[in-house]
Image (cartoon, rainbow, N blue to C red):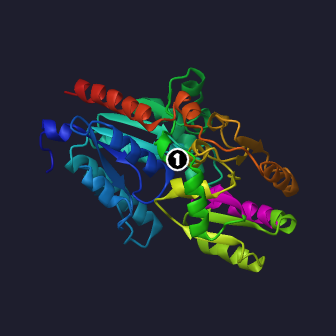
C-alpha cells in the first residue's frame, strides 16, 4: 500500500479521530456521517487503542474503516509514546491519507498534526472540543501545549471549535482574537429527543423510579465531570427530599471510585449506576432535572439532547453559555454552597415540560445542518487537492 496513488474511490474518504465507544464526540461524528451523502464523502476512523468498541459495527456498515495506532502492549511509557507516534506515521503514510479531521482538546494534540504533515497529509482541521485544563493534569501535556500553541497556524489548515471557550483553550490568541476559527455547534437528531409524556411514563416504570424525584447525569467518569461534587450535592438534596434518586449514565476510570464513595455515604439505594446505553433519548424522558457540575467542557452534547426533551438543566458556570439556548437552563458557580444547588434543583419541580427542538434548530444544533457544513467544506477541500 505504501506510496500508491490515490484513486477517486479513496479520495472520497477523510480520516477523523474519535474513539468508537459511547461518547459525545463519537456520537456527533456518527450523526454527521449518517446525514452526509456517503457516495460523495465518507469517514474513516483513527483510534489509539487495540480493543473492540461498541460503535465499530455501526461505522463499518456505513462504509468506514477502523485504523489503529495502538501501542498498548508496550509497558514503558516513553517507548509506548514513541511506538504510537511511529504507528500513526505508518497509518497516514501507508493509507495515503490526504485529509485529517482531528477532534482535539489541548494544544499538545499537535503531536498528531506534526506526524500527519511529516507523512504527507495535505489538509488538517483541528476541531476543539474542550475548554479547560482540569482534565489534563499531566505536566508534560501542559508544557507541550504551552510550546505548541504558537506553532499551530503553521501546520493547521483550518480551525474549528464547538464553543468560544473551546477556541480560547486550544488556539493561539491571534486566531481567536481575529475570529480565524469557525464555530461548529454539536448537532443532534433533534426529533429523536423530543418530549413524550407516554415515553416518560414507560421509561420511569422500566427504571423503577415511578413516583420519584429523578436527578440525572450522563458523562464519562473522570475528573472533568466532577462526580464527587454531584454525589455530595445529591446527599444534601436527599436529606431534604427522601424520594429523590440520582441516576448516572456512563463509564470511565473513576467508575469504581464513585461507586465506593456512594457506598461510604450510605446512598446505594438512591444512587443508580446505569452504565452506558444507546437509548439516552428515552432516559432523558424519565428524569426531572439534569445536573452537570463539570470542571470544564467544550460544549457538552448531553445538554443539547436534554434541552431538546424540555428537561430542566442545572449547569456549572464553567460550561459555555452557548449551550444555554432555552429557559430550561440554569447556571451556578461551583463555589456556591451545595444547598444553593439543591434549592435551584428543587425550584424546577413542577416545571412545565415540552419539546424545545425548534429553538435548538434555530440556534444551529440540528445534525442535518452540521452535516451539510462538513460535506460542503470537505468536498471543496478534496476537489482542491486534485
Quadrant hosting residue 67: bottom left
Is residue 209 visible in the rendered image? The answer is: yes
Quadrant hosting residue 263: bottom right
Is residue 140 visible in the rendered image? The answer is: no
**Residue 158, position as x, y percentages in the image:** 42, 30
**Residue 40, position as x, y percentages in the image:** 22, 34
**Residue at x-position 46% and y-position 59%:** 278
Residue at mark 1 = 193
Give the vertical position of 148 relative to 266 (above or below): above
The stretch drawn in magenta includes residue 216: yes
Q: Is residue 318 left or right of residue 219?
A: right
**Residue at x-position 60% and y-position 39%:** 169
Q: Nearer the viewer, residue 274 or 88?
A: 274
Q: Nearer the viewer, residue 183 or 50?
A: 183
- Secondary structure of the residue carrying tag 1 is helix
**Residue 285, position as x, y percentages in the image:** 59, 54
Give the vertical position of 336 relative to 202 (above or below): above
Give the residues in magenta: 213-235
**Residue at x-position 71% and y-position 77%:** 269
Amino acid at each position: 500500500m505504501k506510496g500508491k496513488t490515490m484513486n477517486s474511490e479513496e479520495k472520497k474518504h477523510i480520516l477523523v479521530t474519535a474513539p468508537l465507544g459511547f461518547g459525545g464526540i463519537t456520537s456527533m461524528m456518527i450523526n454527521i456521517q449518517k446525514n452526509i451523502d456517503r457516495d460523495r464523502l465518507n469517514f474513516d476512523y483513527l483510534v489509539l487503542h487495540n480493543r473492540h468498541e461498541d460503535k465499530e459495527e455501526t461505522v463499518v456498515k456505513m462504509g468506514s474503516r477502523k485504523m489503529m495506532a495502538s501501542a498498548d502492549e508496550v509497558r514503558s511509557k516513553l517507548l509506548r509514546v514513541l511506538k504510537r507516534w511511529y504507528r500513526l506515521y505508518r497509518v497516514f503514510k501507508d493509507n495515503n491519507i490526504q485529509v485529517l479531521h482531528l477532534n482535539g482538546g489541548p494544544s499538545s494534540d499537535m503531536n498528531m498534526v506534526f506526524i500527519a504533515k511529516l507523512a504527507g497529509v495535505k489538509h488538517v482541521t483541528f476541531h476543539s472540543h474542550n475548554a479547560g485544563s482540569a482534565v489534563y493534569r499531566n505536566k508534560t501535556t501542559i508544557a507541550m501545549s504551552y510550546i505548541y500553541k504558537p506553532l499551530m497556524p503553521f501546520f493547521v489548515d483550518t480551525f474549528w471549535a464547538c464553543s468560544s471557550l473551546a477556541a480560547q483553550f486550544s488556539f493561539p490568541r491571534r486566531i481567536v482574537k481575529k475570529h480565524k476559527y469557525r464555530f461548529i455547534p454539536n448537532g443532534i437528531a433533534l426529533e429523536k429527543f423530543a418530549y413524550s409524556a407516554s415515553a416518560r411514563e414507560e421509561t420511569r416504570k422500566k427504571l423503577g423510579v415511578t413516583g420519584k424525584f429523578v436527578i440525572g447525569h450522563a458523562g464519562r467518569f473522570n475528573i472533568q465531570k466532577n462526580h464527587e461534587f454531584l454525589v455530595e450535592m445529591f446527599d444534601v438534596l436527599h436529606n431534604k427530599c427522601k424520594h429523590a434518586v440520582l441516576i448516572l449514565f456512563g463509564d470511565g476510570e473513576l467508575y469504581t471510585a464513585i461507586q465506593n464513595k456512594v457506598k461510604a455515604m450510605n446512598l446505594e439505594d438512591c444512587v443508580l449506576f446505569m452504565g452506558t446505553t444507546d437509548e439516552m433519548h428515552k432516559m432523558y424522558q424519565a428524569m426531572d432535572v439534569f445536573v452537570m457540575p463539570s470542571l470544564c467542557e467544550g460544549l457538552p452534547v448531553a445538554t443539547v439532547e436534554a434541552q431538546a426533551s424540555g428537561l430542566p438543566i442545572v449547569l456549572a458556570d464553567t460550561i459555555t453559555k452557548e449551550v444555554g439556548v432555552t429557559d430550561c437552563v440554569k447556571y451556578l458557580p461551583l463555589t456556591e454552597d451545595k444547598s444553593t444547588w439543591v434549592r435551584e434543583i428543587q425550584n424546577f419541580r413542577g416545571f412545565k415540560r415540552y419539546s424545545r427542538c425548534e429553538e435548538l434548530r434555530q440556534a444551529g444544533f440540528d445534525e442535518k445542518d452540521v452535516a451539510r457544513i462538513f460535506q460542503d467544506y470537505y468536498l471543496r477541500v478534496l476537489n482542491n487537492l486534485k
